[in-house]
Amino acid sequence: MTVLDHRPTAPVPPWLPDASGPRTDPAPLLPDTSPVRVLGTPALAKYDPELLRDLYRRLVVGRRYNQQATTLTKQGRLAVYPSSTGQEACEVAAAAVLGADDWLFPSYRDTLAVVGRGVDPLAALTLLRGSAHTGYDPRATRTAPLCTPLATQAPHAVGLAHAARLRGEPVVALAMLGDGGTSEGDFHEALNFAAVLNAPVVFLVQNNGYAISVPLTKQSAAPSLAHKAVGYGMPGRLVDGNDVVAVHAVLAEAMDRARSGGGPTLVEALTYRLEAHTNADDATRYRVGEEVEAWRAHDPLVLMERHLREADLLDDATVARAAEEAEAVAATMRAEFHAEPELDPLSLFRHVYAEPTPQLMEQAEQLAAELAAEQAGAGA
Amino acid sequence: MTTEQGVRTSSMAQALNAALRDEMRADPAVHLLGEDVGTLGGVFRITDGLAAEFGADRCLDTPLAEAGILGTAIGMAMYGLRPVVEMQFDAFAYPAMEQLVSHVAKMRNRTAGGLGLPITVRVPYGGGIGGVEHHSDSSEAYYTATPGLHVVTPATVSDAYGLLRASIASDDPVIFLEPKRLYWSKDELDTTAPSEPIGRAVLRRAGRSAVLITYGPSLPVCLEAAEAARAEGWDLAVLDLRSLVPFDDATVCEVVRSVGRAVVVHEASGFGGVGAEIAARVSERCFHHLAAPVLRVTGFDIPYPPPMLEHHHLPGVDRILDAVAKLQWED
């Protein structure tokens, strides 16, 4: 005998609410079983050629940025870099879809999206360089700090979007997460709060197949991560995360929906991390070369260039200009990282509180004395 | 319901309610959120009537999820609001610890001053009300060990009002610990009187024999012990810390140096507790003024006991007097 055998056969009395019935019709919320694609389909013709060329340019620059940052880790100039090589379509589309007043809530792998918002590459990398936690002004750039704890930035996005809506301001918050992050409690609480508050927020899950070494099959038994939206009463969307036009389109639709009062959306982008989790990780221990090679054939940059050329939307001059811009960005990064960062030890005490406590002021004096003694010793 | 300005008799719960109401009237950016804070007015009625006066958006009943509540408050603060969060009971705040430690406490530092979070987290704490398990924890040591947070706890009706208003007005996050068993204590409250700021300890009773250093729910117990000690010929001072972070070293040291003997009293477990920190600080700063080691009277190092046994755990007058008796009086 199972629990199911206890279901009442007689009609439920009218005073007892029908708890088994959904309060929201799940059918419209259910994602398509196959991911949305635009490249290689007739839908491509609907898009503004200028937007397409801009997305292409951003992909080229983004790939070069990832390569240069990875090289900087090998040279010891960056402490660590979680590369988004292979995931540039998600990073580029996330940055491109946001308006100036919208807010981005990135995870630690989303430096490229932060740079796409207009943040200086060096400022975006201070956390990973180890010279400062956040090198840019979050308020001025409307970009939250890169978040290292998993999914904890998602409720922040909900709260900010909720506050903006209370003020009647048309701001949307975009929270970026990985597939591993969807297992965290904060992810579930954020989705639930967002749906209950009808907050103008979009959750973008970059499902790159692995949480460090643990594959998705060990992360979730759901048919897709987009399905998780249904239980909270919000739409879920599945998109080819290597098709930059599709990611842009799906995110733009979710942003419009949020901005017009329609509430939150969960977007799952199917993509792949071509590099290891970070430079400290050996990806050959948990995945086979054939899998990586298969995804290389589905590289977001290769796809974009091939399909735009086929549609006669990309010429050699545009390709050359994008390559030049990418090299210029890489050269700037090399030059900036060649110089040693200027560090002020006493800044340690500066932003712990709005007003430092007496205890911190004592400790600042102690460090100042240690520094003075060091300097005197060096001078002697 | 309206708040009368001026002097009246008030319970601590009513004083907290008045503080929330007056801050919400003074600043439209102040928003309350938590489980049951709206229609019900909170399980201890601290938010009673506020949803009716300020609306469901400013006194928000949230889903039951503490990390979500605090995480949402962080985003609201990032957008310029001043959220006041209610964590229904001390031990119910633990699911929000990651948001508290990794984000609330660190956001100003992580962003080089770019994003301060003026959030007040109200935590009803401590035992002595017959609560079953998970309803009586004294969790202050977790908070005081986290740089970036202010930690305050009122012991009087006036401080409940004054410290809560100061906490909400503070640009830094404040953990506001409300001693549950003092919710129903009553006193005169003058809402127009200026109150001592956050970070200052107050001498509640002068004395020449020894000083009891305490805070929150243990203050009335210490005052009672000081009264009882007169029969032994001891004249005890009682110092109410009010604020654990920032810590008022200056006042504590001034009193200890003048008296020469000190006992720290709190109901949280002793090992790794706030009392250990205070004893160490006093020993480092006042060693040559001390006639005896600094002693601690605390709860035992056990999970909070079942309510029918809690009186054995909580420091009472006798345990405090036993400690005072150990302070080597024959000098």
Image: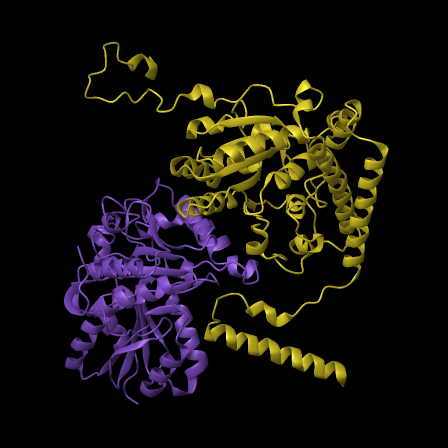
Determine the residue located farthest toward the bottom in the rendered image. B331
Residue A22 percent coordinates (x, y) = 36, 22
Q: Which chain is yellow?
A: A
From this view, report whether residue A372 is shown above or below residue B296.
below
Quadrant containing the N terminus of chain A is top left
The residue sitting at 34% across, 85% down in the picture is: B260
Residue A351 percent coordinates (x, y) = 54, 66
Quadrant containing the C terminus of chain A is bottom right
Kindly indicate the quadrant of the structure image that contains residue B228. bottom left
Q: Please indicate, yes or no, whether residue A179 appears anywhere in the rendered image.
A: no
Horizontal side, residue B249 vs residue B177: left or right: right
Residue A171 percent coordinates (x, y) = 50, 44
Determine the residue located farthest toward the top in the rendered image. A9
Q: Nearer the viewer, residue A162 or B266?
A: A162
Q: Which chain is purple?
A: B
The residue sitting at 46% across, 75% down in the picture is: A358
Q: Nearer the viewer, residue B320 or B226?
A: B226
From this view, report whether residue A50 is shown above or below residue B66.
above
The residue sitting at 44% across, 34% down in the picture is: A263
Residue B207 percent coordinates (x, y) = 24, 84
